[in-house]
Image: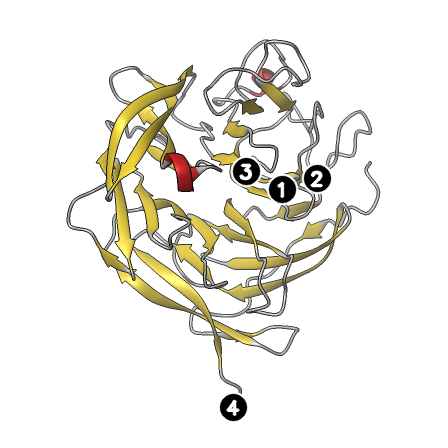
Amino acid sequence: MAAGILLLLGIGCGGSGGGSQTPTGRTFAAVPVIESVDTPSCLRFAPDGRLFFTELTTGRVRVASGFSLSATPFTTLPVATAGEQGALSMAFDPQYNTNHFVYFCYTDAGAGCDRVVRFTDSANVGTAETVIVDRLPIAGNHNGGRIGFGADGKLYVTIGENGNPANSQNPNVLPGKILRYNPDGTVPGDNPVAGNPMWALGLRNSFGLAFQPGTGTPFVSENGPGCDDEINRIVKGANYGWRPDQPCNDHDSAFVMPLARFNPTIAPTGIAFSTSDAYGFAGGLVMGSYNDGTLREFSISGSAITSQQVLVTGLGHLFDVTEGPDGFLYLASSDKIYRLTILPSL
């Protein structure tokens, strides 16, 4: 077992969407900034401050300036929508200010696979579509599909085990892994196995992906079966232990243990790091959950979680969270986008 692991078992919800006092003495609330949207699965701010988001089942990519939506979508991806398929996530190229590249991962209805594509942003319209990674295997569930660029400039992709736990332990297949590519879709020469995009294995269905400021280390939220939702710190070549017949509360030292476990399960979704002092927890990891509509914050020291707090809850199904250029956090539920605010003290 890795040192410093904190097991979070049976965490209660606490709080409310209208505000709940945390252990820090602050009271947070989620205030809608965009309403009547259709399942926004991923939120990302462009370097110029515009908010982009993907709609899971329509395939539309929407753009908002000052939280006013453009009438015309950036693009509409041709998505399949069975089970957990759809428009899954997006990311801006690290060199966006010069190349204007925007990347998307989605389930392609015609090809019957997940793929990563790149567009060039031209005045709120996606142009010059280019396929970057193709033929990522899919199933009705456990597709993963989160993408993001690390501090190393590489493109990371989460892919679930497609409902087959044996896939996670097989290094010769893609499901159940964290994948790492160059921005053009080629495989980096310093990946664990030459010519193989696999960066880490033994994962079930990593939903959220974020990179820790300062270290650049990837963190993922992981959906468990009937037990053990997780937060994992991703290390090159590491095996996180998901396999057929894995027991609950597994402590097999052959595998890397999670930083946190959740029992009962909460269906963790998007994660992000808070980098500003707006809320008083700079450096903390925030995570949404689908089952209870809760946003939690986790303080991290080294490679361990040292404390956690519920910020808001009761927001329906949360899909994603991201930090805006103003330092505030923005959340996506099934039909609204919120800003996390601090209520004044009474």
Three-letter code, disc 3: Asn
Distance from the alpha carbon under mark 1 to that under mark 2: 6 Å
Decide if residue 125 is on the left or right side of residue 235.
left
Using residue 264 as the reference point, say whether residue 72 is left or right of it: left
* Earlier-in-chain disc, 2 versus 4: 2
Query: Which element carries disc 4, helix, strand or loop?
Result: loop
Is 286 in front, or is 184? 184
Q: Residue at x 49, y 23 (%)?
A: 163
Q: Is residue 279 above or below residue 158?
A: below
Residue in the image at 20% along x and 51% along y? 70
**Is disc 1 placed on a helix, strand or loop?**
strand
Q: CA separation, marks 4 and 3? A: 38 Å
Which residue is labeled 1 in the image?
A: 230
The x, y position of residue 233, in whole percent, is 68, 39
Residue 324 horizontal/vertical position (percent): 45, 57
Q: Which residue is mark 3?
A: 223
Q: Which residue is denoted by mark 4 in the rendering?
A: 346
